[in-house]
Amino acid sequence: MPTEQDILDQQELLQVHRRTLAAYLRQKAMMGEANTPPPVMNSIATAREDIKRIKRILRAWGQAVDDHPDDDSQPLLSHNQAPQMTQMSTPVSPPLDTPPSSLRHPRGRYRAYTLFLSLVLVVVVISAIIAFRNFVRPTNVVSSLIGRRFWHTATLLSDGKVLVAGGQDSGNVIATAELYDESTNTWRATADMTRARYAHTATLLQDGRVLVTGGLNNNVEFASAELYDPHSGTWSLAPSMSAPRFKHTATLLQDGRVLVTGGWDASSPTVTAELYDPVTNTWHAAGSMSTPRYKHIATLLHDGRVLVAGGGNNGSPMKDTELYDPLKDSWSPADSMSQVRDTHTATLLQDGRVLVVGGWDGGGSIISTELYDPTKNTWLFAGNMTLARNTQTETLLSDGKVLVIGGWDGNGATPTTELYDPTTGQWSPSGNLREARGFHTATLLLDGKVLIAGGTTQTMRAGMSSAELYTVE
């Protein structure tokens, strides 16, 4: 029969394993079920097996052992809970897995051994968590979109909700729209657009409505425009633009008007630009650009001018740029980028410079980035990303850094993300999405998180309904 010391040693070891299990379960609760790395899950399973083994030994020795819910289920065990032991009336023979007396440690050495084991386990778990977080960004689980889509638009509304509209899925062009509410982590349908469209633009107006322009459906380019009213949840037609266009840009000016530039019209890239006035609900011709272009970028600068850069002209990416002055309704040439690019992205930094990222050079995705300084009218090399990409998203975060997400590298859609720090001029990896995607949207929410929605993993094929949240740390 076991000695009293043997029983005390096993009881103490049971409590050690229960405290270890509780620590793992607390870590799992903090990270969330989906974010918990496999080493932590394996350690939880191992701790539970050890607890079961010790309970069998103690019961075989005639000891009563409580069945704590943590031993076999999910509720957490508080670190100061201790199992209560009482004497059983009928002893039974010890099981085969009872340790021989010669192998059992004296009480002091046993405590030192179990303490050392616990410390080793903690170090292993912490190392696994760090490695896992460096590989997979701790994005929050988000409910899926109601419908699959890519090449859609996503607009942050004044109330913090996100309006997703249009796009396509497996060749089907979409008219549906839906709203994401972060407070409830839910998507709900709102009214359909008046026309199904993709490769369109969506611009939040100063009065809170959303202007959608242009796009494509069944190889027909649209000149049509429509307005979404978030108060009524309805769409209404706006006057049409002067020409059809898709893969164009739409930029909200400081005076509340919207500047639409370029795009592909019925036959080729266009040089035309036009202005929408939401007060009068009218379109007016703006000065024409010097070069036809589509798949370009347009960025509002701090001084009110608009920088247009790159894009395609009859299949050839360009590196030339130009500036629109709304006060003069005129365009002027700007310094050219260092290389040609289309399907690239651009972000206005907090210091007034513009960061241009990636794109397509006619033969492959681009790894380089560059900075435009409007005070000097010059471009400077801003370093290479860790991966070449196009059709990515680029988002200015609350801390001034720039987050680049997904897109297409040389092998298809990528789940990788990376951060640019303007203060150091350095790029760094920022973990992986749960799913690779391109032609998706990324929207900065009011609390600083970034909502990634939809996209596709195959060019012009099936869309995705999944969404995820990037949490800034």
Image (cartoon, grey):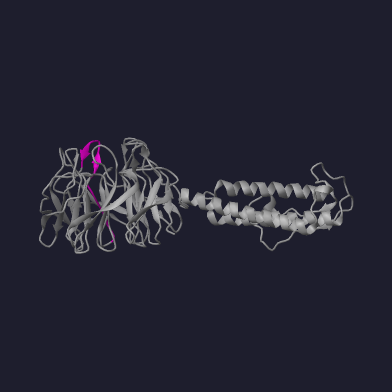
In this rendered view, identify the residue nearer to me: 280 or 144: 144
Q: Is residue 53 left or right of residue 157?
A: right
In this rendered view, identify the residue nearer to me: 380 or 237: 380
Q: Residue at the spot x=69%, y=63% of the render?
A: 80
Q: Which residues are magenta?
A: 208-221
Q: Residue at the spot x=56%, y=46% of the render?
A: 38
Q: Residue at the spot x=31%, y=53% of the render?
A: 234
Q: State whether residue 281 appears in this view.
A: no
In this rendered view, identify the residue nearer to me: 149 or 358: 358
Q: Is residue 440 left or right of residue 65?
A: left
In this rendered view, identify the residue nearer to me: 374 or 440: 374
User: Residue 164, how many percent across, how many down?
Assistant: 34, 50
Q: Quadrant of residue 323?
A: bottom left
Q: Quadrant of the C terminus?
A: bottom left
Q: Is residue 214 magenta?
A: yes
Q: Is residue 302 left or right of residue 421?
A: left
User: Residue 326, how many percent across, how many down?
Assistant: 14, 60
